């Protein structure tokens, strides 16, 4: 098999009902509405297994840190991105690999139509954030080389276990994301500027829509993408939520 290729879908895990587990990631800019969208998914598709981003692990990297100790890696990364970005990406990507290679639950494998949804993925870790931070100069060239080396190694080694059948891309303008970021008012994000969200937006668009990002795995290049415009408020709009749910159902049907 050619280097960097992952076996075709035939190796997807199979449920006890003989159905292949469909595995998706929800991608999108900071504060676009991923967590809110995952809640919408849980209300429309109660049987789906939803795996949220391990944010708390990044905010408390040392279980036994002395009270007030420096263990909020997310805060450290925002306070000094050149010092902490490589460390952050190492931790964020490791936690994402762990969630993606976790054995499937008995409950999921007992379903007729098993679906697993991850909030972001090892692929956005690399092709959105790590790439963006390197281009901003917060990764030096050795760190960028090392990150790509171990990311490619682990992705090849884990192969089917980090396989995705589809990506749901929540698309909104950086300006709207910035408004939502300020509304959410997460303490670590006080210094985040619109310019950073604009750069992350471009990374998402280049990866998922323009397909200009240099992606190192054939399978990843060809993952079907459902683009959902979430500029409008779906959080408090049942009709908008229903429209999104219908689009997701139709997307699943063709995967
Ligand atoms: N479609 C939407 N319209 C208006 N506000 C939204 C929408 N989606 C999320 N929000 C709000 O924006 C903020 C960020 O949403 P969140 O789901 O935490 O984003 P993410 O998980 O992508 O970082 C939250 O305060 C949330 O209530
Ligand atoms: N530098 C990175 N930051 C990341 C990454 N994944 C998430 N994040 C940040 C962005 C937010 O401040 C916070 C949670 O993300 P939301 O989009 O859910 O708000 O964590 C990453 O890989 N690198």
Image: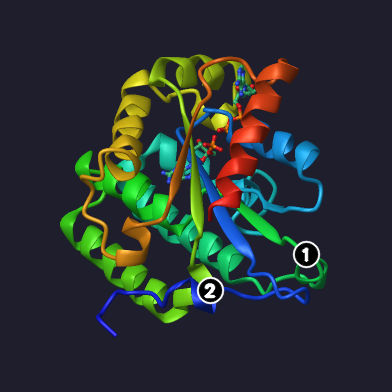
Gap between marks 1 and 2 measured at Cα:
20 Å
* 167 shown above or below 221: above
What numbered label is drawn on residue 112? 1
- Where disc 2 sits, the SS reads helix
In this picture, is 50 found above or below 248? below
Q: Can residue 207 be seen in this view?
A: yes
Left or right of 107 in this view: 14: left
How is the model colour-coded?
rainbow
Q: Which of marks 1 and 2 is nearer the N terminus?
A: 1
Q: Residue at x 71, y 15 (%)?
A: 237
Q: In this view, does 21 lie above or below 42?
A: below
Residue 102 pos. (x, y %)? 64, 71
Q: Name the side, left or right, on which 145 lies relative to 95.
A: left
- Frontmost of labels 1 and 2 is 1
Provide the residue designation for mark 2. Answer: 161
| Label 1 environment density (alpha carbons within 10 Å; few <14, some 14–19, many ≥20) | some
Q: What element carries label 1?
A: loop
Residue sitting nearer the eye, 52 or 93: 52
Q: In which quadrant will I find the N terminus? A: bottom left
In which quarter of the view is residue 19 placed? bottom right
Mark 2 within 8 Å of ligand 2, using the beta carbon: no
Mark 1 vs ligand 1: CB below 8 Å: no
For residue 159, above or below residue 97: below
- Identify the residue at horizontal 38%, vertical 74% (top origin): 6
Residue at x-position 46% and y-position 59% = 93
Q: Disc count in the image?
A: 2
Residue 48 placement (x, y as % from top left): 74, 53
Residue at 60% from the left image edge and 50% from the top image edge: 253
Mark 2 is surrounded, within 10 Å at the Cα level, by few (under 14), some (14 to 19) or many (20 or more) other residues, namely some
């Amino acid at each position: 098999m050619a280097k960097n290729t992952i076996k075709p879908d035939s190796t997807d895990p199979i449920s006890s009902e003989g159905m292949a587990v469909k595995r998706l990631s929800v991608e999108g800019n900071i504060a676009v509405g991923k967590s809110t969208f995952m809640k919408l998914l849980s209300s429309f598709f109660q049987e789906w297994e939803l795996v949220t981003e391990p944010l708390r692990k990044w905010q408390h990297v040392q279980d036994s840190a002395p009270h007030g100790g420096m263990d909020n890696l997310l805060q450290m990364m925002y306070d000094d991105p050149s010092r902490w970005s490589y460390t952050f990406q190492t931790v964020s990507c490791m936690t994402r690999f762990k969630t993606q290679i976790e054995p499937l639950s008995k409950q999921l494998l007992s379903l007729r139509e098993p679906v697993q949804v991850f909030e972001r993925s090892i692929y956005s870790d690399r092709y959105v954030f790590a790439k963006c931070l390197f281009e901003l100069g917060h990764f030096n060239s050795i760190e960028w080389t090392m990150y790509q080396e171990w990311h490619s190694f682990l992705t090849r080694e884990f192969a089917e276990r980090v396989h995705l059948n589809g990506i749901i891309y929540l698309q909104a303008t950086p300006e709207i994301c910035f408004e939502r970021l300020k509304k959410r008012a997460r303490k670590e994000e006080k210094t985040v500027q619109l310019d950073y969200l604009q750069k992350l937006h471009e990374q998402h668009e280049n990866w998922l829509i323009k397909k200009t990002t240099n992606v190192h795995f054939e399978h990843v290049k060809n993952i079907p993408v459902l683009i959902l415009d979430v500029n409008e408020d779906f959080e408090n709009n049942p009709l908008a939520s229903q429209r999104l749910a219908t689009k997701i159902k139709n997307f699943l049907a063709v995967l």
